[in-house]
Amino acid sequence: MGAALMPATNLAYLTGLRFHPGKRLTLLLVPANGATPVMVLPQLELERVRASAPFPMRYVTWSDDTGPSAALAAGMEAAFGAGTPDKPLAVEPAAMRLLELRALEAVAPGLRTADVDPLLSELRMVKDTAELDLMERAVAIIEQALRVALDQVRPGMSERALSRMLSDAIFAAGADGESFANIVASGPNAANPHHENSERLLQAGDLVIIDCGAIYRGYHSDITRTIAIGEPDAEARRIYEIVLAANEAGRAAARPGVTGAAIDAAARAVIEAAGYGAAFVHRTGHGLGTETHELPNIVAGSDTPLAPGTVFTVEPGIYLSGRLGVRIEDDVVITADGSRTLTSFPRELIVV
């Protein structure tokens, strides 16, 4: 049989082709026997795709007045033969919409599906030199932007105002986009790891979590730093130092053959030993590449040995409800003889 890929991350990874999100059916049909892939796509996309495709494809087009059904039926027959396939078609459950699934079922009644994500996620997990170069550029962009934004932080500024300045700085530094909507979480708001930016004003004594990332040519960076508005109290500074030590322990544990579970355990042990284990409420990290969150997961139960070229975050945190939060996040790549931290922004507490 083979696979059907829709316009999403996997298709962009394999072909470099990106499409404007919409309701016009587009699918790449990839035969498992190595035959030429077939792309079913709107007529209006044909010339652009044909000029950019990195390998030979056959094209079956459809127009707005005819609709995609006949084209999809022809594409399925060209890729996989006539009739309903006797083997499951591999699809992307996390990306495919009912729009694509129902269209496939309509032209191939009784179609069975399987999950292609494990295969492609494993392929994407290990980055080559060209991919790492792009990720390092994405890291340089976000660190430049963060530096610019922190130079403008003042008490009395709102979280949203700082967020907007950070977004502007990310694009000004050369990003194609933000990896995600940046997070600025101040004071008690920082106790929520996924806080939505608000009009709360930065106040003296606050710890402020700033979580942001940049996209460069399809590859992502992701960094978090926690800063202080004026000198923090002794408890806040002590918690910061615990999280910093956990970050260092997690990064130090990274080497070829280590598992995500082992890295998570190394970082978590520091926080648990300090008595704050219950306040570390999320995994230590996640894979990073053409998506902000991909494999591997840096968490208990993630037992796949990590190969050189694997990129992931290390981002331990402590969150005390209604009071404060601290998170320090870096991007790390496994190397042939250890690991390398791609992010280099200062980790010591910055007081503004």
Image (cartoon, helix red, strand yellow):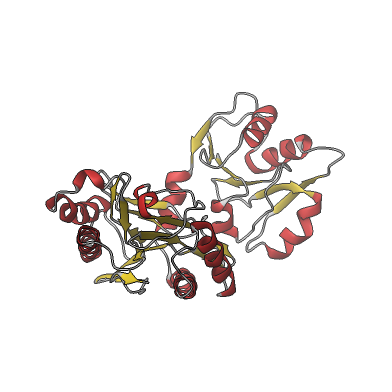
Residue 65, percent across and down?
87, 39
Q: Quadrant of residue 230?
A: bottom left
Question: Is 121 left or right of 33, judged from the image as shown?
Answer: left
69 versus 272 height, above or below = above
Q: Is residue 65 above or below residue 297?
A: above
Q: Quadrant of the N terminus?
A: top right
Residue 256 seen in the current view: no
Q: How many marks?
A: 0
Is residue 248 in view from this perspective?
Answer: yes
Residue 24: which quarter of the image? top right
Image coordinates for residue 308, horizontal then vertical, percent = 32, 65
Q: Residue at x 52, y 66 (%)?
A: 166
Q: Residue furthest top?
A: 110
Q: Is residue 222 left or right of residue 278?
A: right
Q: Can you name the residue that lies furthest to the left here?
A: 273
**Residue 161 at x, y percent in the picture:** 54, 61
Residue occupying the point 31% across, 57% down: 326
Looking at the picture, tell me which residue is in the foreground, 296 or 153.
Answer: 153
Query: 291 or 281, which is in the foreground?
Result: 281
Q: Quadrant of the C terminus?
A: bottom left
Along the horizontal axis of the image, is 30 left or right of 331? right
Residue 208, image x and y in percent? 38, 60
Is residue 75 placed above or below 199 in the rendered structure?
A: above
